Amino acid sequence: MSTQLNVAKFGGTSVANYHSINNCASIVVKNKHTKLMVVSAAAGVTNHLVMLANTALTSQQITDVIVSIRKIQVAILNELKRPSEVNDKLFELLDELDGYARHEEINYKDDLKDALMSMGERMSSLLCAAVLREHGVNAINFDVRKVMRTDDRFTQAAPDINTIKILSRQLLAPELENHIVVTQGFVGADAQGKTTTLGRGGSDFSAALLAEALGAATCEIWTDVIGVYTTDPRITDKARPLPELSFEEAAEMATFGAKVLHPATMEPALRYDIHVFVGSSKEPDKGGTWIKRNCEHEPAFRAITRRKDQVLVTVKTPKMMYAQGFLERVFHIIAKHDLSVDLITTSEIAVSFTLDNPPNSMSEKMNKETIVELSNICEVVIERDFDVVTVVGNNMHSSAGVSSRVFAAISDFNLRMICFGANVHNLSFVVGKDDSEDIVKTLHRALFE
Ligand code: ADP
Ligand code: ASP
Ligand code: MG
């Protein structure tokens, strides 16, 4: 395999319609090292599928949602120069989707939900390969389930890195010799061959995992913004794109809410030292952000992120001072449910921590079970409607005056909890959800404008 191999991933808005897919095809064709294209579902499709999977709908409502999905896909089909090449396959996939959506147990069985949720990527990869062929390249659509082995935690599956590596080298690498391969992000399969998914936004992670498995030099994440910004450009138009970021900074940003990258994307990149590029498929000439191990500059402040939908859990036992092993029992319960605790503070009689609680997510369900179990061993207080705002940078713990600049900027706001991250890259605040946007804007003004 060429050591200069590039894997290019295109997100939902980049493959939303025929015109956008053409932009993606031009990007792929332009770089001779790009052999693998990883695609998301067309914008909106996964949200429709989630609705079908998680909501009890009447037959008419199911039909309406499916019609919306069909419209998106058929609009692309109809613009192809040779629609007949993929027509039958697309309608076969739409029929398969229909079958899952109307299955009587669809709202109850996670394996069925994943089979349904994978359909968006399966359709978009078929159509993207067809568009690439119009650009004169020998493109094929490859079923990623042959190589993307995961465990069977449906809707939130974890990859089996070694097996992915072995299967990719056996089954995918040979295809890259003579073709440009288009495959699905987000989708995997367990050891039994059952379809799984990697969690929302998981296509970035797929691309990084495949890049690692194939020994790629670079992985490009093409999206709707010209790189990773100082903060979400939807929060303030003063946000500006960053030319470079370190793996650690990017991982921290993703973990603490920068939706532009799935939180796990940096893990394979870091393991294999794959340089990651983030740019806009609409404006590829505007450049973007390079994420790598060592940056030229390591500024104290790099970016600000916000993560919404946090619950603050406080566990109290008056006997905590004497109760040896109490913390261990608390964390045993949290770990058993596979929840990760990012922010935590302790006092002699209480421990407070945040849990990620996006509505209708797997973690929401796990959080409920965790809280019930914790209540069996101690007093538990739950507070809702919080966001976490994080300043990401370098050496924020040790440099004089760095954190005081942050605190001075937001001294007028009510900060429910303040945490220095366990590493040197993060300073986080738990704040009321109605304040978080103003806090991000205020911090951005003080640190970056
Ligand atoms: P895709 O469908 O291509 O995966 P996403 O919607 O998942 O795209 O991610 C891109 C979006 O991430 C942007 O439109 C932007 O609003 C949001 N975003 C959040 N934080 C940042 C940030 N720091 N820099 C850039 N984009 C960000
Ligand atoms: N289509 C999936 C989602 O919308 C995965 C992705 O786009 O990354 O979550
Ligand atoms: Mg995304």
Image: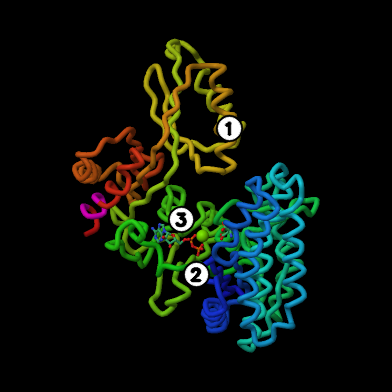
The residue singled out by tag 1 in the image is 335
Quarter of the image holding residue 219? bottom right
Seen at 61% across and 68% down, the residue is 38
* Residue type highlighted by circle 3: Lys
Q: Is residue 348 above or below residue 173?
A: above
Q: Residue at x 66, y 61 (%)?
A: 66
Question: Which mark is first along the chain, 3 or 1?
Answer: 3
Q: Mark 1–mark 2 contact, CB under 8 Å?
A: no
Q: What residue occupies the far right of the structure in this picture?
A: 192
Q: Residues within 10 Å of mark 1 (few under 14, many from 20)?
A: few
Query: Does any atom of ligand 1 lie closer than 8 Å to the CB of label 2?
Result: yes
Separation of residues labelled 1 and 2 (CA atoms): 34 Å
Mark 2 in CB contact with mark 3 (< 8 angstroms): no
Q: Which residues are magenta?
A: 442-446
Report which residue position mark 2 lands on. 222
Q: Residue beneath label 3, please?
A: 259
Q: Quadrant of the N terminus?
A: bottom right
Give the left or right position of residue 99, taking residue 354 as reference.
Answer: right
Q: How many residues crowd mark 2 within 10 Å: few (<14), some (14–19), many (20+)?
A: many
Horizontally, is 413 left or right of 169 in the view? left
**As drawn, is 47 to the left or to the right of 138?**
left
* Image coordinates for residue 254, horizontal then vertical, percent: 45, 53
What amino acid type should be assigned to the residue bearing mark 2? Trp
Tell me which numbered mark, 1 or 2, is placed earlier along the sequence. 2
Confirm whether residue 157 shows in the render. no
**Is tag 2's residue or tag 3's residue first in the polypeptide sequence?**
2
Q: Is residue 443 magenta?
A: yes
